[in-house]
Image (cartoon, grey):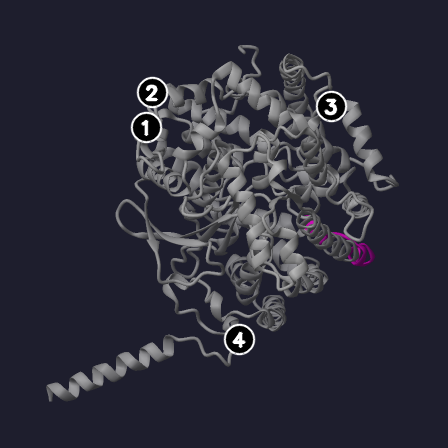
Amino acid sequence: MKRLILITVLLFVVSCQQESKMNSTINPFFQEWNSSFQVPPFLDIKDEHYMPAYEQGMKENLDEIDEIVNNAEVPTFENTIEELERSGKLLSKVGRVFSNLASSNTNPSLQELQRNLSPLLSAHYDKISLNEGLFNRVDAVWKNRKNLDLTSEQSKLLNDTRKGFVRSGALLSEAQKERISEINSKISGLSTSFGQNLLAETNGFELILDKNDLDGLSEDVIAAAYDAASQKMDKTDSDEEKEKYNNKYVFTPHRSSMYPFLTESTRRDLREQLYNSYVKRGDNNNETDNKEIAAQIAKLRAQRAKIMGYKTHAHFILDDNMLKTPEEVYDLLIKLWKPAVKRAKAEVADMQAVAYAEGHNFKIAAWDWWHYSEKVRKEKYDLDESAIKPYLSLDNVLQGVFNTTNKLWGLNFTEIFDIDLYHPDARIWEVTDKDGSHLGIFIGDYFTRSNKRGGAWMSSFKGQSNLDGVERPIVVNVCNFPAPVGDNPALLSFDNVVTLFHEFGHAMHGTLTNVKYGSMAGTSGPRDFIELPSQLLEHWASEPQVLKSFATHYETGESIPDELIEKLLNASKFNQGFINTEYLAASLLDMDWHTISADDDIKDANNFELASMKNVGLIGEIAPRYRTTYFAHIFSGGYSSGYYSYVHAAVLDSDAFEAFKEAGDVFDSNLASRLRSSIYSKGSTEEAMDLFIKFRGRKPVIEPLLKVRGLDGSE
């Protein structure tokens, strides 16, 4: 009898194991993901699976909408608003995977699919947002809201849902709706082209050098460039191509490659060549040129805003943000612009003095900034970036940010090694709360590669919701750090460290979120608020006790010396003229592009940009952080009329961190608890300013930011 029971149990186990495997004959998106924590089965997903899944997802989504619209019952919060929340699950399932991989691990097939999907998805969502019957039900619930026993979260969801329909054109005439849909489709296609052109332009330039071109470069920079050339050789079967890279050194416009070269190389001619390859991306009058595309997008957005009843696109966008008008944004930017440019001019004078002292008679140019500012920094602060990097291996920094969130909120991170991801570089951790309960999954993808778009970002493969049971998120951070060379670990600059803490702040916003409705979870708030949780975490990166906890030399195991930390902190306000001026220039350029009227006809994007920068007095030694033709944030991302958000959030984060400073403990448990409950866990369930006030006890002030950036006249 015991033997029979054992056999039965074994057969049951085998049966369960077989059922848990993906059926290779069925599209993975049409199956339940029984993998650990419902991580997408990346190795089973093929490029050909996306379009059928998208098509089925759109069909199911529209069927769900029809069911809501045709419900014979009186519209209620439950049968209308909550059913809307439940709709589109398959579309979201495929969309999250595709959008993430199309950005971080793309290929020609995915890029073609992006181009084909862009107008289809735009039209699909317009069918929902411009559905008169659906809006009428939402509006009916909204009009009856005072008679409903709604929680505060439900009340905000109801208001946000109706506002979303109105902002999409629900109150427009049929002719206006058709025009809005047409504009949305055009913008979607142009935005996709802009992003793909930018990737092609970034990958389309290589500075291939011989050994005698490497003057001034450190051993690790040389090794990375040699490794880049070797990888090019390994990826080609052409003898001609192999010879092209044989015993050569490759540098590219990717920042992880370009910045070290601009900083260290003594070859001014080569610095100019590489720098110009970066600032001319999308501006080369070829098939991947972005000038006309950018101008078309801006004009279409202005036309759409006019139809919607707004003066400009910026007025339309800002109506949904913390700052409500272009005038408020310009006022904030100019308050910082004046001291920033003044500081930048002083920095130019310092660099020019060094160049003259070396016997040069040239005028400092934009491609000289990194090289000579580093010399000034060494002279003023005796701080050498290359002396810091050995203490900042990627694993050390990850442990540092894990430790920081452990001390703040008791979080723990356990790396998982038996889940296949979409690329060998990506790593995965389970995040648990202080009581050991599961909070979410965190994926980190940190190294530059040619099929990954530039920059750094946070996204998710699964959202958080408590509507139909507990659903915990799967979040991902994607960065572009230099990969390890040889047997050495990946070594980061301190700027890289700040970027890692920043994106991890977004990840924590996505992981700690705890709301009922998925559309309100995590980073769903106003654009000029959601940078607060990310930028706030940056402050801990430069705290001495935090640095001491993780910064150990990768060879000796020695902890970073106090003297080096002191130098780093003393130099923290160094080059702030440049840093703030290039950022503010881009923010002002964004606002100028999006305060044009529907009747403006921009013939030349370069002339528009030149006039914009001349108007505010940008000095020739600095280009905007993003010129028009590679300003992906605003032309192929979600930051149009919103790039200022980083500085608005900086006002918030500097003031918020000041609370910890005032408490005398950057890990003050009461403040940390309030920070989590008031901001990191709330998503967009309350008004952004109310959330800040709940944490800080008052509205934000700008003085802490001016102090942090050395723009208060104290330096």
Residue at point 63%, 12% (across, down): 357
**What amino acid type is highlighted by mark number 3?**
Leu
In the rendered structure, the answer to whether residue 413 lies left or right of residue 115 reads left
As rendered, which of 714 and 96 lies closer to the eye? 714
Q: Residues within 10 Å of mark 3 (few under 14, many from 20)?
A: many
Q: Nearer the viewer, mark 1 or mark 4?
A: 4
Is residue 177 in view from this perspective? yes
Distance of mark 4 from mark 2, alpha carbons?
A: 56 Å
The magenta region covers 166-179
**What amino acid type is highlighted by mark number 1?**
Asp
Q: Which residue is mark 3?
A: 618
Distance of mark 2 from mark 3, alpha carbons?
A: 40 Å
**What amino acid type is highlighted by mark number 4?**
Asn
User: What is the x, y in percent for residue 681?
Assistant: 42, 43
Q: Are marks 2 and 1 in contact (CB under 8 Å)?
A: yes
Q: Residue 237 shows which numbered tag?
A: none
